[in-house]
Structures are given as C-alpha cells and as structure tokens.
Amino acid sequence: MTRTHQHTPRHGGNGHHPDHDHGGHREHSDGGQAEILDLDAEVLAEHMASITAWLPLKSEPRRVVDLGCGTGAGTFALLERFPDAHVTAVDTSAGHLRLLREKACARGAEGRVRTVRADLDTDHWPDLGTPDLVWASASMHHMANPGHTLRSVRELLSPDGLFAVVELAGFPRFLPAHAPENRPGLEERAHAATDGFHAEHVPHRGADWGPILTAAGFTVEDERTVTIDIEGERSEAIGRYAYGSLRRIRGVAAPALGPEDLAALDELLDTDSPNCLLRRADLAVRTERTVWAARRA
C-alpha cells in the first residue's frame, strides 16, 4: 500500500462538504445544503476528476454505485470518466435525488443514471445490483455504524470490484490566518467552537479508514492523500462557497464564541458590509482529501 501526498496549489478537489449529511441517516429540508454541495462540486471539480482518474481499476467499470451521492458531484464525475458506465445514485434525501435527476436530464444522461432513496444505516438495503465500483465520497463518516455499512458494501461488490472511500480531514478553511483584520484567527476559533458538536454527532469524521476497511473484510490496495490550495481568484464561486460554509458553521459555533468573535463573524456574513466574504479578495480553499481503494479480502 502506498500513500501519496500530492500537493496541488491552485488545483481543485473533490468531495462533499464535511458537515452535510447526504449519505446516511438523517433527512434535511435545508435548501442551502444542496447549494453548498453544488458549490463544492464546482469549486473542487478538478480534484474530483483527478481522483476518478487515479482509481486502481482492473478494467473499466460498467456498473457503478454512488453511496451518499448528494446532488451528484461524484455521479457526474464518474459518468464523465467512464463513458460506458451506468451509475446507481443512492441517498437518504429525496430533494437531493430530485436535483440529481434534473441535472441528468439537462445533460442528456438520464438513461445512464438510476436514483435510489435509501437509509444506509438499516439492515435491509434495496437491490443495488452487483457493481464493479462502489464510490462513497464524504458519506461514510456520517454512518451510525460504519462497520455494518462496510460489510454491506462488501456483500454488494462484484468479486473483482473496487470500493473507493473518499474522506475529508476536516472542514475547508477560507480566510488567511491574519484575517479578519479586527479579529485575526477567527476562523480557527469558530471551528474549535464546533468540535464538541462534531465529536458527538459525527465521531468518525477524520478517521483512518484503512483499519476500519480491513476489519470489515477488505484489503486496502492503495491510499492517496491530496492537499488542496485553490486561490480565490480562480473562481467567483469560492466567495459563495466560503459564505455558505461559514454561515452554516455559525449556527453550531455561536453558543461557544465570545461576543467580539461573534460580531466579527456576523460582519463577514453581512451582505451589506464591505468586509463580507462575498467581497473579499483574499479567500482560498484549503483542505485535504484521502482516498482508500479497497477490494474484498
């Protein structure tokens, strides 16, 4: 097994937003969540493509399952990478699946996509066929019992099939360390204020999935960690991505933030303020993604 640290300044990335449950056990009606997932896909598209190109496949897959598909970032990257493949996109959110179907129709790919609404934490999964590739991007850490889910994937996968788990080291960072000018380091303090919440609600976020996969009956064939640093000038979507992300963090962090930090955060989120995230020229997207490529042991 090899671990590759690929430093990709000014390049994109993949995956869904770390604090969005799009694969497992909770249903959301938050329309802003779908917007963040779409922005995540847009901003990090190059990295998504690089991961699908890296996958150590023995042959090109024809049957693919995207577990916790969200609004389709992985689904459409996989369809583009594998032009003969059909993807079964699985999610717990009816709203996300509806948006995914609309995108498929708009792209003329509706014949290559099947959507399935399912709770992956249950004992009885719907019929998902026998896929050559199972893809799970930023969804495994939301499972209540990841070992159970992984064993279900093992039973599902074809004998020579590949299971790709893409996970995040943590929430993306957007501001430089010295920002904002009146409260330097605010972003890190806001993240620290959410640690207790995440430890309780998403305890597997940031886990090393290699041993967990091995315990579930997989052999980890390869592993890759990608460091992402995308400068804000590359895409105006980065401002919207930062704004939507920090707005969601505020809801969790607010009770643990001091009044000065909360006021500074609210200024960053105030669309009438000249310091609003949507107007800042110093933003970037900094994060890491790790991919584990595994087969049935």
Image (tube, grey):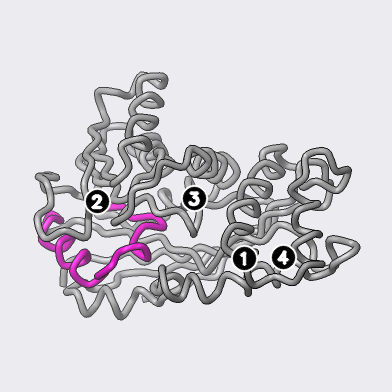
Q: In this view, does 191 lie above or below 73?
A: below
Given the image, on which type of amino acid does mark 1 rest?
Ala
Which one is earlier in the sequence, the residue at label 4 or at label 3?
A: 3
Gap between marks 1 and 4 measured at Cα: 10 Å
Read off the residue under disc 3: 50
Q: In this view, does 38 lie above or below 7?
A: above
Q: Is residue 219 above or below residue 101?
A: below
Which one is earlier in the sequence, the residue at label 3 or at label 2?
A: 3
Q: Between tags 4 and 3, which lies in front?
A: 4
Gap between marks 4 and 3 measured at Cα: 29 Å
Quarter of the image where the N terminus is located: bottom left
Q: Is residue 60 visible?
A: no
Quarter of the image where the C terminus is located: bottom left
- Which span of residues is magenta-colored? 134-158
Q: Which mark is residue 253?
A: 1
Which one is earlier in the sequence, the residue at label 1 or at label 3?
A: 3
* Neighbours of disc 3 within 10 Å: few (<14), some (14-19), many (20+): some
Read off the residue under disc 2: 133
Q: Do the residues labelled 1 and 2 touch (CB within 8 Å)?
A: no
Q: What element carries label 4?
A: helix
